[in-house]
Image: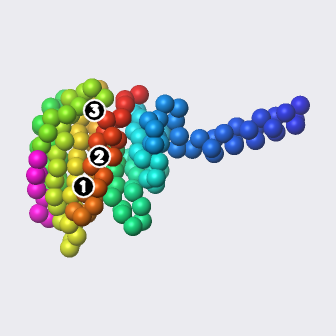
Amino acid sequence: MSKKLTLLAALCIALALVSCGKTAGAPGGMKVCSNNEVDYFFYVPESWTLDLSTRAVSAYCSAADPSSISVMAWDLSEPLTLDDWWSAALTDFKLAFAAFDVTSELDTTLDGAPAKQYACTAKLGANEYRFLYTACISRSTVYLITYTSVPENYETHLDAVSDMTGYFRFK
């Protein structure tokens, strides 16, 4: 009996290791970038490196190209529209970054819920960055997907970022 339990435990551990970062139903070429702490499924390209250590799940492309994407969620203490939330967030972004500028705004959806994408540029110290924020309010929670890159790599990942936001699903 103990041999069977040991074999079963070993099999479970092996399956867990093999499936780490994978999810049944993950889109082709992608892996799950979410954990049990969050209430959504988020997928990134298989080649990206995951960080699931906090409630703000994230992934980056590579050491040579540290372009990254993250998902954060906040419960709202009071009902807000997405435009009201963005206005408050914009104030905070402008305090945190030098030369923060919104270059475009686009209506979109996140798992069918109304959302907006904001393309932005900013400086942090001497470094320049480009951001693409996808924001959505659903179930009294703000969801913010942030793609960050240096200007020369920004366009390189826009198709992948579109796939990542397109496959986002609420649990």
Q: Which residue is mark 2?
A: 159
Amino acid type at mark 1: Glu
Q: Please provide percent x and percent y for residue 105.
A: 12, 43
> What residue does disc 1 label?
155
Question: Where does the N terminus fall, quadrant-wise?
Answer: top right
Tag of residue 3: none
Q: Residue at x 49, y 31 (%)?
A: 25
Q: Is residue 162 visible?
A: yes
- In the rendered image, residue 126, in percent from the top left (x then y), is placed at 20, 73
Q: In this orientation, does residue 38 appear? A: no
Which sits earlier in the primary sequence, circle 1 or circle 3? 3
Q: Which residue bears the numbered disc 3?
A: 110
Give the amino acid type for the residue marked by disc 3 in the picture. Leu
Residue 120: percent from left, percent from top: 16, 53
Q: Main secondary structure of the magenta part?
A: strand
Mark 3 burial class by Cα count in 10 Å: few <14, some 14-19, many 20+: many
Comes first in the chain, label 2 or label 3: 3
Circles 2 and 3 in contact, beta carbons < 8 Å: no
Residue 53 is left or right of residue 94, and the answer is: right
The magenta region covers 98-104
Identify the residue at horizontal 30%, vertical 52% (top origin).
Answer: 157
Residue at (29% x, 56% y) in the render = 156
Tag count = 3
Secondary structure state at the residue bearing disc 2: helix
Q: In the rendered image of this protein, does residue 62 appear above or below residue 36?
A: below
Q: Residues within 10 Å of mark 1 (few under 14, many from 20)?
A: few
Does 75 appear in magenta? no
15 versus 91 height, above or below:
above
Q: Quadrant of the C terminus?
A: top left
Between the C-alphas of marks 1 and 3, the distance is 21 Å
Q: Helix, strand, or loop for circle 1?
A: helix
